[in-house]
Amino acid sequence: MAVFSARLHWALAFAVLVIDICLVALTVFMDKMHHVEPPAGGETEMTAAIGWLGVCGAVFIFGCFGILIKTPSVQEANCDCMVFQCYYSFAVAAISMLIWLAAGSSDGLTFNASSFSMGAFFATLWIISQVCAYNAINAIGYAVAPAIWIGVTIGVSFVWGVAVFDNPVHSWPGAVGALALMLVGVCLAAASSAISDRQSQRSARELAQGVSQTDHGALLEASRKSPAAGAAVFW
């Protein structure tokens, strides 16, 4: 059964990889064929197809990126989170360079003090966030951990967009209501983990009590059938 699960897991991981490549390739192709300049002054362009494609791609890719963390071989290795990040982050850097070569290398490489400092700052935030994500997925599972941090991330992004980048909010009641519903979902996701843990502990206790009662009943039955054997057992 474990072999079948490992094969199924790798098959799903490969399928996710293929879909990810298709999404990135489609995004690069659309940007070249129908390039849309980013709106200025904090404005948004809701009709840009590449924007919606980016949203759909981000939903899928960020929703599936941690699947390999739960791979049986990774779980058995019990790899330290920082060691895992050495492989993880190197792969991210390598793939990012490949995408740049395919999509933006014609514009030249921007390398100055500002770009280097921002890159170093982003790399620091990336390592910290992924270390936390790795430990969270191992601790509370892949269904619950991303649901919590993605929900909170949306709230943080909303604050950055409104307070720092001056993105317009056309309906404050709608925005506040959506954030409230999202926070309720995050709380329910967190509560589901706690409820599941309590149910698992209760089931384990009930099973242990059932086994103990069964063993005790068997000893009593043995003592009734053979008093000498029963005495020897209890002794």
Image: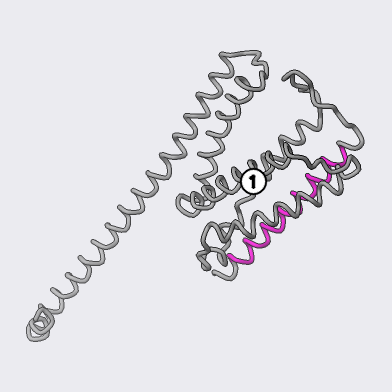
Left or right of residue 28, residue 89 in this image: left
Q: Main secondary structure of the magenta part?
A: helix
Is residue 122 positioned above or below 79 on the image?
Answer: above
Q: Position of residue 156 (x, y in %)?
A: 56, 29
Is residue 26 positioned above or below 183 on the image?
Answer: below
Q: Position of residue 89 (x, y in %)?
A: 65, 54
Q: Which residues are magenta?
A: 5-30
Q: Position of residue 139 (x, y in %)?
A: 45, 52
Mark 1: secondary structure: helix
Q: Is residue 138 magenta?
A: no
Left or right of residue 20, residue 70 in this image: left
Left or right of residue 88, residue 137 in this image: left
Q: Tell me which residue sits at (51%, 68%) in the image.
A: 76
Indicate the amino acid at tag 1.
Answer: Ala
Is residue 184 positioned above or below 106 on the image?
Answer: above
Viewport quadrant of the C terminus? bottom left
Q: Tell me which residue sits at (68%, 61%) in the image.
A: 11
Point out the residue furthest to the front here: 113
Q: Please give the residue where the numbered disc 1 appears in the rendered image.
A: 123
Q: Residues within 10 Å of mark 1 (few under 14, many from 20)?
A: some
